[in-house]
Image (cartoon, grey):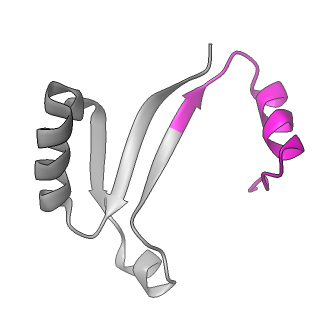
């Protein structure tokens, strides 16, 4: 099975994001983690973004499939 099992929003305004996604998603917003985007990341040019964690049966095969489609593995 392939599914997102965790979503994290890294943003500069966690309060506003929490209010917005609370209105949009209702009870589903409880499944989200909303965290402050670190100052060092901002200084390096990072913008607010989502991190998604995907459940897979075979990590090596899934990794190879992502790389085969152009993903760059990070060490």
**Residue at x 83% of width, y 44% of height:** 69
Across and down, in percent, residue 6 comes to 42, 33
| Above or below, 56 relative to 24 | above
Across and down, in percent, residue 50 comes to 44, 52
On whether residue 70 falls in the magenta region, the answer is yes
Across and down, in percent, residue 31 comes to 28, 30
Figure quadrant of the C terminus: bottom right
Which residue is outermost to the front? 24
**Residue 27 location, quadrant:** top left
Across and down, in percent, residue 10 comes to 36, 59
**Residue at x 10% of width, y 50% of height:** 19
**Residue at x 20% of width, y 55% of height:** 17
Total marks placed: 0
21 left or right, relative to 52: left
**Residue 23 location, quadrant:** top left
**Residue at x 27% of width, y 50% of height:** 34
| Above or below, 71 relative to 68 | below
13 left or right, relative to 7: left
Stretch of the chain drawn in magenta: 53-75
**Residue 37 location, quadrant:** bottom left
Figure quadrant of the N terminus: top right
| Above or below, 53 relative to 58 | below
57 left or right, relative to 66: left
- The residue closer to the viewer here, 21 or 38, is 21
- The residue closer to the viewer here, 42 or 16, is 16
């Amino acid at each position: 099975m392939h599914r997102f099992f965790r979503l994290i929003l890294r943003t500069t305004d966690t309060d506003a994001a929490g209010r917005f996604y609370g209105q949009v998603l209702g009870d589903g917003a409880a499944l989200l983690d909303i965290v402050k985007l670190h100052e060092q990341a901002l200084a390096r040019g990072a913008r607010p973004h989502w991190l998604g964690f995907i459940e897979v049966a075979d990590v090596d095969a899934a990794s190879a499939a992502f790389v085969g489609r152009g993903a760059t593995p990070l060490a």
